[in-house]
Image (tube, rainbow, N blue to C red):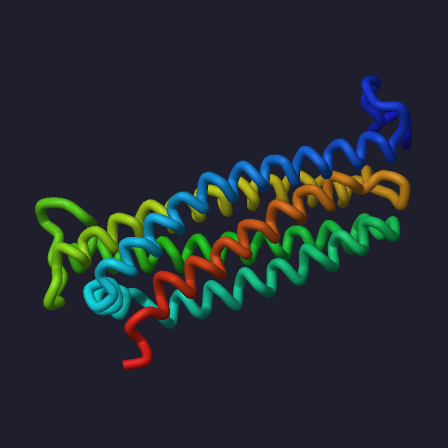
Amino acid sequence: MSDRVLEKQFADLAHQSETAELGMWGFIATEVLFLGGLFVAYSFYRYLHPAGVAAAASHTRLVIGSVNTAVLLTSSFLMSWASLAASNGEGRRAARLIWGAAGLGLVFLALKGLEYAEEIGERLWPGAAFSLDTPEPRVGEVFYFLYWVMTGIHALHLLIGVAALAAIGWRAHGGVYSRAYHSPVRVVSLYWHFVDIVWIFLFALIYLPGRSA
């Protein structure tokens, strides 16, 4: 197995796995810096216009957002289980769990696409045709601009994650991973958990304001 998976620049599989995991943590750190800027911008705008943002946020699809949150949390559980299965040398079980998580990712994207379609139909796309029945429609337009940017970036990351899950699922089914070598499953699992955590923050910041009233 080592001859098939060990790259020549590494001393052994442990060194290769540690490097791959460190690389993923580095990538996640850069993504936190990038997305953190958007979160700060949104939070500052919400601080300046609390009533207008809350009124706009109350028009988001809370049911779809809640279902998608449950979907992603379930997929994270499956990926944690898959990582454990791969580390125990249970490649076929890991593959089924990984494909299950990928399938839930596709469910999320389908529901998000439905949500986007409804919002476009209600003219909640920022621009000349934007229309929102709130006391501060211009504040609502900026809110929806940030909404489309932030959720769109998240959806793109999720789509990339689904492709990565499909790839490692196929390799797990083919018996590539073992107790000695399963770092790709762990690395992709870290990425998937990161995407899920980002969504939890998006859900709390975008869907929940203005609901208590």
Q: Percent position (x, y) of residue 148?
A: 31, 49
Question: Is 83 situated left or right of 4 in this image?
Answer: left
Q: Is residue 141 left or right of residue 21?
A: left
Residue 176 appears at what percent x and percent y? 81, 38
Q: Is residue 129 visible?
A: yes
Q: Residue at x 31, y 76 (%)?
A: 211
Residue 56, percent from left and from top: 22, 64
Q: Which of the pair 157/200 is nearer the observer?
A: 200
**Residue drawn 18% across the image and 48% down it:** 126
> In the image, residue 77 lies at what x, y percent?
66, 62
Residue farthest toward the top in the current orientation of the protein: 8
Quadrant where the N terminus is found in the figure: top right
Residue 101 picture quarter: bottom right
Total marks shown come to 0
Q: Residue furthest bottom?
A: 213
Q: Is residue 29 left or right of residue 108?
A: right
Q: Quadrant of residue 11?
A: top right
Quadrant the C terminus occupies: bottom left
Q: Is residue 46 left or right of residue 153?
A: left
Q: Is residue 59 visible?
A: no
Is the residue 16 above or below the residue 124 in the image?
Answer: above
Q: Please tell me which residue is depicted at 54% across the width and 50% down the height of the picture.
A: 195
